[in-house]
Image (cartoon, helix red, strand yellow):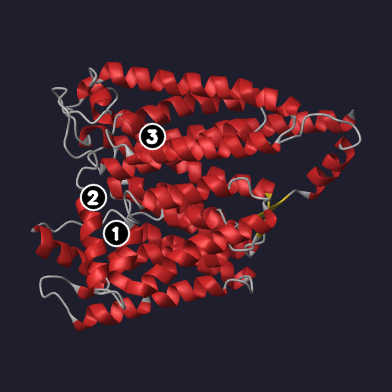
Amino acid sequence: MRYKRSSRVVQKLLQVEYIKLVLLHLAIAFAIYLYEPFSMLYSLSVFAYFIFTILQKKNKNNEALMAAAYIAGVEIFWRMTGGVVFYETGKYAVIVFLLIGMLFKGTSAKTTPFWLYLLILVPGIVIASLNPDYDEVFRKAVAFNLSGPVCLGVSALYCYYKKISKKNFQKVLLMLLLPIITNMFYLFFYTPSLQEMVINIGANYAATGGYGPNQIATIMGMGSLLLVIRLFDVKGKWVNLIDLGLLSMMSYRAIITFSRGGIVTALICAAAFIFLLYYKKGRREQKQLQIKIIFLVGVLFASWAFSAAGSSGLIVNRWTGKDARGREKEDLTTGRVDLLSTELEAFYHNPVVGVGVGKAKSYREKELGEEIATHSEVSRLLSEHGLLGLLGVTILVVVPMLFWLKFKNNYFFLCFMLFWFLTVNHSAMRIALPAFVYGLALLYIVEDKRAAGRNAIKERKPGPVLSSQF
């Protein structure tokens, strides 16, 4: 009885703490909307706080991973509002925080495949240096094309076989979610409704604060996925209701970008998470999950209906492959098939070492007459790194699958691996998020000691399994 009372008190305190954090990030969004230079102060404060915390606690509870999560979530918002000096600051910061964390805790002895993956990237740099484009800065081209893959490699090195308690893992996910909530609120302040936007059937910059709709849809999709995960993994009626409200807002902002990749990715990942969770639960818990699934479907349907009505049906046309007048469009992939075919052609003609880092773009310009950056990280690895790139892709897919088949203790694995793979194949690695999320799939999640003890007691007395309270 005493334990139940203390558990309820802790649960209420954590609910209050969560509400305070959401309100704080709402305030940050409003302050930056009123005066955009606050964004630089925001970024400096975040860096100072996490550096101090990691050094003070010596990464005892994976504070470096929490810092990297926050940066991965806030990267696009800082780009939108001028919160960083360098465009690739987000990726560099994730790399640096994780490297600091590795100085304190090291890496697993089983990370050899990911060291090999990082080494595979080097020959492509050499090939590119032998054939420089005089209208392109070599250093910038290499940094732009390799910052994402290196970020992924470092994330994998930190996370592979890394043990983390479920409580701390939930904190990592919360750190990833909070800045995305800030971004969402900022977009509502910037463009409150569709009626205030000039919209068309293409990607909608007016709905994304003037920033790239593809990347905004990706980050809003990630936020929606995290809220779905919290709905099923966090216990607390009020917290669940708050998360449902945030989910309705987040999914609405994702839909009205008119960019489909991020939304499709989030839906597939959410379905994978729910399926795996449902499969692992008992009958009694499955009935509880069914109720939440009904509420979830209702919220998502309402968001879709509201978006479709507000756009006078243009959203529906976009998703059914029609133009603004309702006529069928010839290319549903908005040119991505042409990009993919040129990169595969470059791989065919240069199979051993590829065309070199950053050279797929110039190769495509010669073939198509257009200078367009890649939208698929997999085809980019093949075209720019050749057979070594194929080996790299194999490592990135096969090693995690073997890890999961061996332990199967991380029921977030499937949704996070799908998020990485689907995202890098529709918007490449322009942001740190897919690289960081890839690492999360490789974590070895363990039950908290107290929770493990409670579960052992419940094996003798059946009852609902307590989930994370944060």
Q: Which of 104 and 152 is in front in this view?
A: 152
Quarter of the image that includes the C terminus: top right
Reading the image, the residue beneath label 1 is 85
Q: Can residue 358 be seen in this view?
A: no
The mark nearer the N terminus, 2 or 1, is 1
Estimate the x, y position of residue 274 in percent, counting from the top left.
Answer: 58, 35
Q: How many marks?
A: 3
> Which label is found at residue 184?
3
Query: Disc 1 marks which amino acid?
Result: Val
Which amino acid, by three-letter code, is at mark 2? Val
- Specify whether residue 323 is in view: yes
- Residue receiving disc 2: 337
| Sequence order check, earlier mark of 1 and 3 | 1
Where the N terminus falls, by quadrant? Answer: top right
Residue 236 occupies quadrant = top right
**Callout 1: SS:** loop
Question: In the shown orientation, is residue 273 left or right of residue 151?
Answer: right
Real-space CA distance between mark 3 and mark 2, rounded to the nearest whole angstrom? 31 Å
Helix, strand or loop under label 3: helix
Per the image, label 2 sits on a secondary structure element best described as: helix
Q: Residues within 10 Å of mark 3 (few under 14, many from 20)?
A: many
Q: Which of marks 2 and 1 is in front?
A: 2
